[in-house]
Image (cartoon, grey):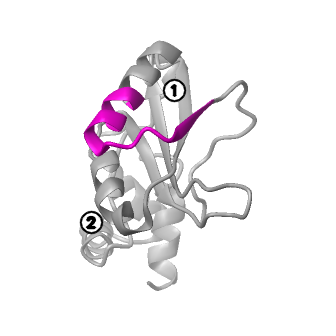
Amino acid sequence: MDQVDREILEKIQDGIPIVEKPFSEIGESLGLDESEVIDRLNRLIDEGKVRRFAASIAHIKVGINANAMCVWDVPDERVEEVGSICASFPEVTHCYERPRLDDWHYNLFTMVHGKSRKECEEVIQRISERINIDTFIILFSDKEYKKTGVRL
């Protein structure tokens, strides 16, 4: 990734302009034509450096009022399998394996979103039944202090 790629990513990380030709507008601001911006973005996608373009919604304004970090005690030999299953649920937005600690034996972390705490609990129960693991703790968020994506 060169400096021009970084400049393109810096331009789009806060959103793509809502205009008829957004990549043309981005290109103009960087002294590039539309096709070069598109070609560079396609290359970054092919290289796995850009995963996707997506709308970022204000979840509370669209009725997603609850989120829960669920921590699971997964047998080490099942982490890959269980992580893949958990990640397949559309209500799960994050799924990470983390090391166990001396006083914290949970090693798989999932973030579940729903319209209510009850909905999150129902999703987590479905996950629990699917993976056949019932050792977990649900940690609901009380207050959001900061939420951003990774920045360049």
Q: Nearer the viewer, residue 60 or 56?
A: 60
| Residue range corresponding to the magenta coloring | 124-139
Q: Nearer the viewer, residue 33 or 51?
A: 51
Q: Position of residue 27 (x, y in %)?
A: 39, 64
Q: Is residue 132 magenta?
A: yes
Q: Is residue 126 magenta?
A: yes
- Marks 1, 2: nearer the viewer: 1
Say which quadrant the N terminus sits in: bottom left
Residue at 36% of width from left, 36% of height from top?
Answer: 128
Q: Residue at x 39, y 39 (%)?
A: 92
Residue wearing tag 1: 58
**Is residue 144 rendered to the left or right of residue 150?**
right
Residue 61 visible in the snapshot: yes
State which quadrant residue 99 falls in: bottom right
Q: Is residue 102 above or below residue 113?
A: below
Mark 2 or mark 1, which is nearer the start of the sequence? Answer: 2
Residue 116 in view here: no
Callout 2 amino acid: Ile
Residue at 26 percent across and 39 percent down: it is 130
Task: Calculate the distance from the C-alpha at mark 1 to the C-alpha at mark 2.
Answer: 27 Å
**Would you identify the image quadrant in which residue 45 lies?**
bottom left
Where residue 90 sits: x, y (%)?
A: 30, 36
Q: Does 25 sit left or right of 39 as displayed? A: right
Around disc 2, counting alpha carbons within 10 Å, would you say few (fewer than 14), some (14 to 19), or many (20 or more)?
A: some
Per the image, the residue denoted by label 2 is 38
Q: Residues within 10 Å of mark 1 (few under 14, many from 20)?
A: few
Along the viewing direction, whichever of 16 and 122 lies nearer the viewer: 122
